[in-house]
Image (cartoon, helix red, strand yellow):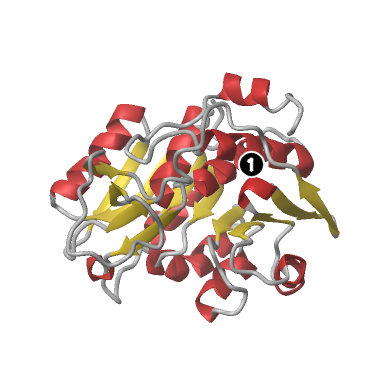
Amino acid sequence: MSSHTPATDVLVLGGAGVDTIIHVPELPLPYADSYMIDSGIRTRAGQTGDFVALGLAALGLRTHHLDLLGDDPEGDLVRALHREHGIALTALPQPAGTKRAVNLVGPDGRRLSLYDTSRSRPGDRFPPELLRTLAGASRHVHVTITQPGAEALPVLTATGVPLSTDLHDWDGANPYHEPFAYAADVVFLSAAALTDPERTMRRITERGRAQVVVATAGAEGAYLLADGELTRVPPALPPAPVVDSNGAGDAFAAAFLYGRLAGEPPGTCARYGATAGAYACTVPASRAESMGRDELLERATEPRP
């Protein structure tokens, strides 16, 4: 490897944590004194940054994950997950503890997430010199929308390394998401809270530096804005019954970035994303499992439903 070749393909910033998964009989869940959960209540490592990192690594990309973790059982689960999958992890100390959430999953795979906001502090930061070092050794940086990630954007932008982010269910109005939306070269978001996805997507490109914007729309596929043209990305056929939508957006982003770093055009990248996202919906939330490269390339060439 020459001295000018980055050691890492993608640096993932933030989004490490632990989820507790509870399968419920329906969503919204009617009030009751108690529910019997026959499928069990399971806690496993894996939040948005973890799942993007897992997806990238499963596709053969050299991946490095940076976040703050507590010295607690949840942090141990996150560290173990990265060791098991061979993903480099730089874990800075987080005295408030490792991020955690509870996911209620309905029979149709939809989820309701409850995030524990006590596991962060207003002063949480990534050291600028560490950011410059890790970003400078990477081909690409994916930034999750956590507060340390927001504080890191000016430093990352100054490095010149391409950035991506996932705005998740942004409504197009919440100002918190705007710095991420306007700093990234590739922007992912869900269309779930958007009344006019095209208007929001075009505003991102007009006000920021995004070259590509993707709005995922679940079983309806996705919207792709690239080179000023909006196209519809058809959904991919899941290879097994849909059991859980948790992690589908992260899988989409990872596969899209795989295609982009391989030099594929945006349409092909979006097809990769849809294929990986459909696969993720067939994986129970209690498992951390991502689609491999060979299966992705094979299934991405199959006809759409």
- Residue nearest the viewer, comparing 235 with 251: 235
The vertical placement of 146 against 226, above or below, is below
Q: Residue flagged by tag 1: what amino acid is it? A: Phe
- Secondary structure found at label 1: helix
Spot occupied by residue 187 in the image (x, y as percentages of width and height): 63, 58
The residue to which callout 1 is attached is 256
The vertical placement of 178 against 216, above or below, is below
Spot occupied by residue 138 in the image (x, y as percentages of width and height): 52, 43
The vertical placement of 182 against 280, above or below, is below
Density class for disc 1 (Cα within 10 Å; few <14, some 14-19, many ≥20) is: many
Spot occupied by residue 67 in the image (x, y as percentages of width and height): 33, 54
- Residue nearest the viewer, comparing 266 with 136: 266
Quarter holding the N terminus is top right
* Left or right for 296, reference 271: left
* Left or right for 257, reference 142: right
Residue at figure coordinates x 46%, y 64% from the top left: 145
The vertical placement of 8 against 73, above or below, is above
Residue at figure coordinates x 53%, y 50% from the top left: 141
Residue at figure coordinates x 61%, y 42% from the top left: 257
Spot occupied by residue 205 in the image (x, y as percentages of width and height): 74, 67
Quarter holding the C terminus is top right
